[in-house]
Image (cartoon, rainbow, N blue to C red):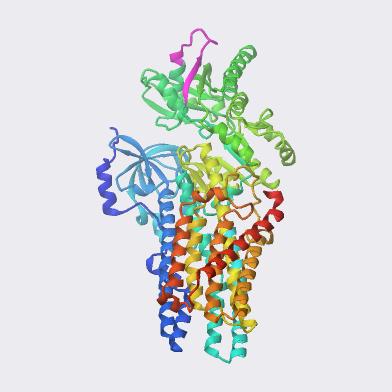
Amino acid sequence: MELRGLTSEEARRRHLKFGPNEIPSYQSHGFLRLVIEILKEPMTILLAACGILYAFIGERQDAFVLLGFWGLIVFITLYQEGKTEHALESLRDLSSPRAIVIRAGSVERVPARELVVGDLVQLRAGDIVPADVVLREPFQIQVDESLLTGESFSVRKDVNDPAWAGTIVVQGQALAEVTSIGTETKLGQIGKVLKSARRAETPLKKETQRVVKILTVFSVLLSILTGVVYVLFHEDLASGVLVGLTLAMAILPNEIPAVLTIFLSLGTRRLSQKHVLTRKISAVDSIGAVSVLCVDKTGTLTMNKMTVQRKVTSFYAQVSELDLLRTASLASNLKTFDPMERAIEEAYQGQEKPLQLVLQYQWSPELFAMSNLWRSVDSKMLMIATKGAPEAVLKMCRLPSALEIEVNAKVDELAAQGLRVLAIAQGACNENELPANQIDLPLEFLGLLGFSDPVRPGVADAVKECHEAGIRVIMMTGDHAKTAATVAEEIGLRQSQKILSGSDLEKMTDTELKEQLNESNCFSRMLPEQKLRIVKALQERGEVVAMTGDGVNDAPALAAAQVGIAMGQKGTDVAREAASIVLLDDDFTTIVKGIRIGRRIYDNLQAAIGYLTAVHIPIAGISVLPVLLNLPIILMPVHVAFLHLLIEPTCSLVFEAEPGSTNIMRRNPRREDQPIFSGKAMAPAVVQGLIIFSIIFFVFLYSLKRGRGELDSRALGFTVLFFSNLALVFMNRSWMREMDWKGFSRNRFLWPVVISSLVVLLLVLYVPFFRGLFHFSFLHAQDLLLSLFASIVGVFCFEFWKRFSFKKKM
């Protein structure tokens, strides 16, 4: 009796009643915890301290303003963090493992978290069991339960035996019924303990934390020193404390960790929108630095939609094409998602098969072939059906030399047409005399099948784009060398004339392999474990390697590569777990899109950090220098709080949304170990900040020298700083080349941020109530023009410096 499983409606009702099939691993922030973490931020603590101190000395208006700003900053930070959490939550939903489920007799692929008790799931070699199940129709299935038991050997399972969530199917296949989900599974009980576990930190985050610690110590020491100097000059302890707190607010680098988290988290969201699912957040950083891209041919470069194009039976007059297709069908898995086996079934048109499958010999690295043994009602002998790589099947059939030469010539002819070639053989044996090894089966060669698998649209253009971006593309395939050569030529692969096979690699030392990698980008008849050798050889040459894979044996190479890329459609669960990225559409062009986005994310992050560095230098400078020179104070806590309301959203909106530069895929990859805070990278930002600081302080001194009062000079200096901040936004969008005037319209947040900021500035300067809160006097039109002119001078000074300093990079 056929197992039909639940209906979709029954599954939906159970999902609503019992919740998702989800094992807890990491604790989410939760709203309350998120609020507590924000309130612990240095900026919010300092702002609250300033407000309380103002209230203590009787300046109630200033206290209310600062506490109002405190509330706004908490709200904005909460919104940004919530946006980040939402992005990560969406990523978690996407990254849920997939399961093949049978509902109402039809086969579907659904997220494993949607499984319910009573579902029928199909398990195959390489799958991770998605829930606790009981086996209903097992066929030679063996499961690795070491995750739960610690035992390294696999366990054979029979009908009604249980299999536990998280264990791995290492052989065979089965239909199984779900008995427990989520926290009710054995693994789920363990998962409850992992709620408090922390995620591994990326190298970029570690670098950021190190820099932030250094800057924090420096900021605290400088703030204390400045406060002490003010007290010595003015003998006013309360004001001295305020000056110190103001400086700490001005220069503490609290935005940098927030910007890093936002960029990487939203980066995962941007990648997922292009069908690139990021399983490890470190891959967002690494994918933009990829210098070598190692890819499978079938399904990644090609459509993975195969059709039987040629049927060759001319070697024996008595063999018909129908006989050839029937044997190929009998040599296939009973229920399969393999495109080649589906193509065989379509060509054979579902003719009737014998009653019972007795034994199956699987593909192995030693022999690229599989055989099924069938028991027929009208015979005591078992029928053998075999299909596989021509060289493997010919070895099993032991043909006469003349016939073997003829068959190989036909294989070469088909392969040169870009077809994948399978050899088909059949035989018979007594059930009591089954050989231990597949190669010893008694077989008779029948013929060849040639399968067409067209190259995906856009692959040739994507390969060309990789070459222009300084990214080397290496194609690996299990196919015949001539099939690989034809596809390599069609996609425009460089250095594809010399093709190395898996057997060639076996004969090479690691040193010889490194040398051969200079001459070839095409590998045929590759074994999955040989990919690992190539990954290591490339990494020893200093390359950043992206490696694709879909099988169980691909997992070591995927884990070893800086960017392991598993196939979302044809890949096994084991491969996806080992990878840092999953392609949801298995398309090579999607990988290239991901690299482009990765480069864009890194560029935008570098620009944002450059902007933050540049804008904090003048803020810190005009907070410290007037105190040291015993001049009137320019910046008070209210001004710094106001600036922070502009600076952090500018980073998270404008710079994060900045489209990639037009030459982003026409430059060589950056080094993976290139620090984002290196002196060379930060030099432009420091120059920007010093130029702007010099101009602001010059305007402030000029105003004081002309007899303008403290309120006038403060308003003028602050306005120059405000305009300069907006100028920095424009400059840092293209801080390593000339300003991109034509690209301003491509960023949807740029002009809204600029216009809203200008409106707020006008309110502060010309509405008496706000002007009083900020301790400003009325600025005349010529003062505004002077401030704007001074900011423009700063822009042109930096552009002039940039033209000469980065002449070679433009």
On screen, 737 above or below 526?
A: below
Residue situated furthest top in the rendering: 317
Magenta run includes residue 309: yes
> Camera-side residue: 336 or 201?
201
Image spot of residue 129 (x, y percent): 42, 46
**Residue 295: quarter of image:** top right
Specify whether 705 is left or right of 760: right
**Count of numbered circles in the view:** 0
**Residue 135: quarter of image:** top left
Is there any visible trace of residue 217 in the rendered image?
A: no
On screen, 63 above or below 620?
A: below
Image spot of residue 27 (x, y percent): 43, 62
On screen, 188 above or below 475?
A: below
Magenta run includes residue 566: no
What is the quadrant of the N terminus in the image? top left
Specify whether 271 is left or right of 394: left
Look at the image and give the residue range highlighted in magenta: 306-323
- Tell me which residue sits at (56%, 25%) in the image: 389
> Camera-side residue: 595 or 784?
784
Image spot of residue 742 (x, y percent): 55, 48
> Camera-side residue: 281 or 41?
41
On screen, 428 above or below 88?
A: above
Residue situated furthest bottom in the rendering: 235
Is there any visible trace of residue 525 in the rendered image?
A: yes
- Tell me which residue sits at (59%, 90%) in the image: 234
> Camera-side residue: 97 or 720?
720
Image spot of residue 224 (x, y percent): 60, 82
